[in-house]
Amino acid sequence: MIKGLAITPPILGRISIGKVVEKNGKRIPEKDDQFTITSQIQNKDSGWVKHPLDEQLRAKAPNQKLRSIPVRMIFNDPDLNLRAEYTLFDRQTGRPICIGNGETCQCLTQQGVEQHPCPSPDLCPLAQGGLCKPYGRLYVNLDDSDEFGTFIFRTTGFNSIRTLAARLRYYHAASNGILSCLPLQLNLRGKSTTQSYRTPVYYVDLTLREGIHLQDALHTAKEIDQKSKLCGFNQAALDQTALHGYANAQFEVDGEEGIDIVDEFYAENSQQQDQKQVHDLTQVQNIQQGLQQSVRSVN
């Protein structure tokens, strides 16, 4: 296996609750009040090409507003289905420069990847101005004809990451560890906060599919798990293989993916924010010094 290459679940398409639009010559993210399922292909005129599943599910949705999507988890381990870290991107190349979990971080330097304490964005001076954000990736299966093919939902929202992390852990515990056998669905929810000036903020939740009670879902999941084992399916080995794949590289995100992330989640709001961009690897020494100083100030 090539070292340094992150082996992530095969991606068939994307799930989003927004899009990138061009205004005044700038590409900026625009939020939406419904899901959109796209392929991995873009065209110059309309952006991401919709996946056939989008039309199929939308036709069944009230007013054709796609606000719930039936899904299945590939893995039993919640942390293999949902990946989330604090991430500082190079705004020009989309390359991740620093990834941390609030305790430690991996920082890209001219000498390679080094480990440093991670004070979290609230306490890190380099994170001011929105340069460092939580970045989550949820991998879900939408098409049973491809058992290991996934659609990815990317988000930098605390509400979605927190809610999805909680639901995955709760369902994992309630099902006695057979999360991958549960019939689940993604739901789009909205709430208003002071910071949103009372306008709705949309986030993604995970529940049992509509009309299915927990006891029935657990009973069905147990039957599916038993039948799979009788056929020789080894879910534990699959989870372990996925874990090794993620760990094969220091950074799971590559530069190509990072460009899309920067376009979608990092709006150019002000000149002051532009001046704070990290766009050259020669500045990584400043990142290291800032991390060390922030840790000393916390201590």
Image (cartoon, grey):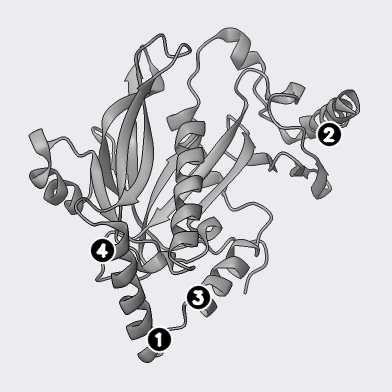
The kind of residue tagged 3 is Leu
Q: Distance between the residues labelled 4 and 3?
A: 18 Å
Residue located at (32% from left, 85% from top): 227
Residue under label 4: 143
Residue 101, compared with residue 251, is above or below; it is above
Q: Distance between the residues labelled 1 and 3?
A: 13 Å
Question: Which percent across, then down, holds residue 238?
Answer: 50, 75
Question: Which percent across, then down, holds residue 91?
Answer: 58, 29
Q: Are marks 1 and 4 in contact (CB under 8 Å)?
A: no
Residue under label 2: 288
Q: How crowded is mark 3: few (under 14 residues within 10 Å), some or many (20 or more)?
A: few
Residue located at (59% from left, 62% from top): 246
Task: Pick whichever of labels 1 and 4 is earlier in the sequence.
Answer: 4
Question: Which percent across, then down, holds residue 25?
Answer: 38, 16
The kind of residue tagged 1 is Lys
Q: Nearer the viewer, residue 107 or 111?
A: 107
